[in-house]
Image (cartoon, rainbow, N blue to C red):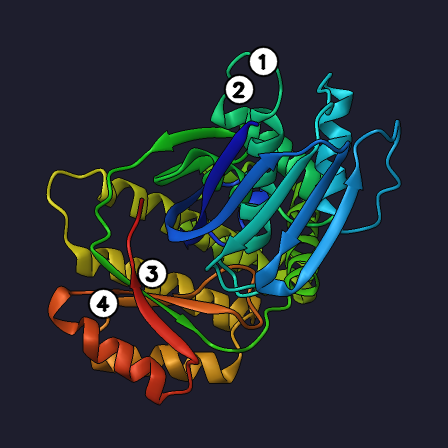
Amino acid sequence: MKKIFIKVPARICFYGDHQDYLGLPIIAGTINRFIKIYAQENNNLTFNIDMPDVKQKRIINIQESTFKVNKGDYFLSSMDILKNKGFIFSRGYDINITGNIPVNAGLSSSSALVVAWIRFLISIQEDLKKISDIQVGKWAHESEALYFNQPGGLMDQYTIAHGGLVFIDTEFAKISKLPNNLGHLIVAESGMKKETLSVLKKAREYAQNSIKSLLKVYPDFKIKSFKQEDYEKYKSIIPVKYQTYFYSTIFNYTITLGAKNHILSKKINRKTLGDFMNKHQYILDNYIKNTPKKMASMIAGVLKTGAIGAKIVGSGGGGCIVAMVNKKDISNVIQSFIENGSVNAYEVKLI
């Protein structure tokens, strides 16, 4: 009987948080934390799913012609989307899903699961042509965000499906591979659950409303042609309620472009990349306000201990922190995270 193994990595956004749903670029990468699917064909017409890490089991009857999909059921949303694309599920499998990506912590455990599940569903098709990574990312984004009308952008699914360090032009879903020039990286788990949907919803709506306000006065305005020095010129047009989100949109965009150009340069200065990360975090904390005080203290502590740069990961409100460090400072930075309240901290590698 057919056996299948799928292994899909976690993701970190390094530059451009809260930009993908505005059609602006991001820089993200996949790390050596994984969701793994082990599957073996059975004699039933069911997917028998065991998820021991979260102590959950479920059975999916693949004979059903239509699926009643509850909100957040990414197993069924993925199957529903692929069935509409002509996929056929004709054989059952016993499926074991495990992983070491912290849940609800900003490393995209849910998106990794969706990408892994879609790769599994692809792998059990008969005589199917090769599916591109871009297509896998697109289907994963549809399954996780668009299907349920949730506010997230496409960064997570596209990054995980593609792998490595990438620059994504989210307006056109175009991905460019970047060299891995970020040096040594530490991830710290704060122990605080992130507030994904509430943070994303407000950030998205306020940023979009700030741009809409500007377009009413300047209908030809384009974010991608904006210069930092133009901020004061346009600021008074934006309602006060949205001004900090307009600021974050504009300056995070220029930070992301600056980081990309430096990563691609012939001579890398990681302090420069760390400075870009710190400027990004300053905006996330002070303008989008997605960094709890406890996590801000952790970041301040590791910067004093030797980290070159540090920022919250993901939507915010909790979750993880990533720090860029020199090799000699790895142990000191990990110790600083733990002493300042992190429940876990460890080195990760871009893959």
Labelled pair 3, 4 in contact (Cβ < 8 Å): yes
Report whether residue 220 is seen: no
Using residue 69 as the reference point, say whether residue 31 is left or right of it: left
**Disc 2 from disc 4: Cα separation:** 39 Å
Q: Mark 3 or mark 1: which is in front?
A: 1
Labelled pair 3, 2 in contact (Cβ < 8 Å): no
- Residue under the image location 48 percent in, 27 percent down: 133
In the picture, the disc for residue 131 is: 2
Labelled pair 1, 2 in contact (Cβ < 8 Å): yes
In the picture, the disc for residue 128 is: 1
Under mark 2, the amino acid is Ile
Q: Mark 3 or mark 2: which is in front?
A: 2
Q: Is tag 2's residue or tag 4's residue first in the polypeptide sequence?
A: 2
**Disc 1 from disc 2: Cα separation:** 8 Å
Along the line of sight, the residue nearer the viewer: 215 or 171: 171
Under mark 1, the amino acid is Leu
Under mark 3, the amino acid is Met
Dividing the picture into quarters, in which one does residue 195 lie?
A: bottom right
**Disc 1 from disc 4: Cα separation:** 47 Å
Instruction: Locate residue 290, reporting x and y percent.
Output: 56, 70
Instruction: Locate residue 220, reporting x and y percent.
Output: 61, 32
> Pointer 3: what residue?
277
**Disc 3 from disc 4: Cα separation:** 9 Å
Quadrant of image for the C terminus: top left
> Pointer 4: what residue?
308
